[in-house]
Image (cartoon, coloured by chain):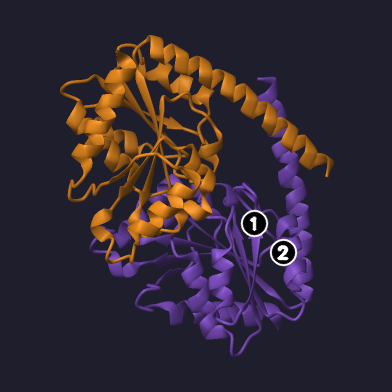
Chain colours: A orange, B purple
Amino acid sequence: MGETVRLIEVKENILDDNTRVADALRARLKREKTFLVNLMASPGAGKTSTVIHTTDRLKERLTVGVLEADIDSTVDAEKVAATGVAAIQMRTGGFCHLDATMVSDGLAAIGSEGFDLILLENVGNLVCPAEFDTGAALNAMILSVPEGDDKPLKYPLMFSVCDVVIVNKTDTCALFDFDRARFEEGVRKVNPSCPIFDISCRTGKGIDAWVAWLTEKILAHNA
Amino acid sequence: MGETVRLIEVKENILDDNTRVADALRARLKREKTFLVNLMASPGAGKTSTVIHTTDRLKERLTVGVLEADIDSTVDAEKVAATGVAAIQMRTGGFCHLDATMVSDGLAAIGSEGFDLILLENVGNLVCPAEFDTGAALNAMILSVPEGDDKPLKYPLMFSVCDVVIVNKTDTCALFDFDRARFEEGVRKVNPSCPIFDISCRTGKGIDAWVAWLTEKILAHNA
């Protein structure tokens, strides 16, 4: 019991410290006119594919960089770099989430000044990343259709902290009996107003609408 | 920095304490002839569907119970209970994993004595559950095809701690360009010998082979 109390105390201190670092980072990026997006999702939901589709549409008009977080391996950063976009891999070495200090370190490594947009791919996990403010101006989460339409009920914190939800792999809705109305109803229980974009990284459907919305956010932030 | 060192110390103590509780629980369940399976996977990989297919095939010949862990919601336990199998929902209240003490509490709640098999559905997460021994006799993990064949590279701890890997949604391999050989190669890098079963909860394919293997493990443990 003593251990549990101690753990909770340490966790609260860590979260408080992290919020301070995140707020300072957000203020700095606002001054520097760099829009940081924190992209969260389950393993295999299509984070890296969404990153690549998004940067493909923006890289001609904006200076874009990508921070890829992973517990191990560097395959995601390699995939992104192959498309001609600046990318670095952040290995968390077992950590289940990113905190604002890790993100600051990642931004220093990529040299974030001069970037209009940095996309940060968080660790594949619907639980822990929701607890840690990364300093991003926008929290986005991707839910892929094969995961099921009941996920907002099961991971309410994640769905409540995100500013936008992207539904990926929508070309497989029929195959997985995904009830889009039921999904939205679940999202609305914890997040009354965030936009929801339906995309398919396989077919490209819906990505233009997501990128158009994102572009407005970037331009407004960096104005 | 002081906080980080303190966090690591607390985490190490927590893990040590948990291992002691888990070892004691495992010994007790061995004496009581109850086989506990810890089932881990990403959100939406098909844990509950696999539980239901498995219990459907075993409930006539064995006394089976199910512990469903979830951060919030009780939908999984309700689904399982609807099939006539004893099930209780354990809400972790935000925790990203189960530890052995939580599992002991769940076993007390279901009244585990007299059960031949208890299936424990862990929180949907490929990271944190891998760090905490639940006291189970068998660690099983499910990887669903839409998540991609590269997951062993990205979540090596999970793939290394499991005693068996189940590949679910194999009816969608072609749709998701899932390279089964590449997946197995990835598993073998961290886990040279665990069996891998290919199933589809949608079509029922492969489930008999998994259940036959599991039955042998249960009978050997409870002999």
| Separation of residues labelled 1 and 2 (CA atoms) | 10 Å
B112 over A108 or under it: above or below: below
> In screen coordinates, is B112 left or right of A189?
right
* Residue A114 picture location, percent across and down: 30, 12
Q: Which residue is mark 2?
A: B106
The kind of residue tagged 1 is Arg
* Residue projecting furthest to the top: A31
Give the quadrant of residue B89: bottom right
* Residue B119 picture location, percent across and down: 61, 70
Labels 1 and 2 share a subunit: yes
Q: Nearer the viewer, residue A218 or A186?
A: A186
- The answer to whether residue A83 of the structure is visible from this angle is no
Q: Nearer the viewer, residue A202 or B144?
A: A202
Circle 2: element type: helix
The numbered mark 2 sits on a residue in which chain?
Answer: B
Q: How many marks on residues?
A: 2
A58 over B30 or under it: above or below: above
Quadrant of the snapshot with the N terminus of chain B: top right
Mark drawn on residue B91: 1
The kind of residue tagged 2 is Gly
Give the quadrant of residue A136: top left
Give the quadrant of residue A215: top left
Q: Residue at x 40, y 67 (%)?
A: B168
N-terminal of the pair, mark 1 or mark 2, is 1
* Residue projecting furthest to the bottom: B60
* Residue B46 picture location, percent across and down: 45, 65
Q: Residue at x 61, y 80 (%)?
A: B85
- The answer to whether residue B220 of the structure is visible from this angle is yes
Quadrant of the snapshot with the C terminus of chain B: bottom right
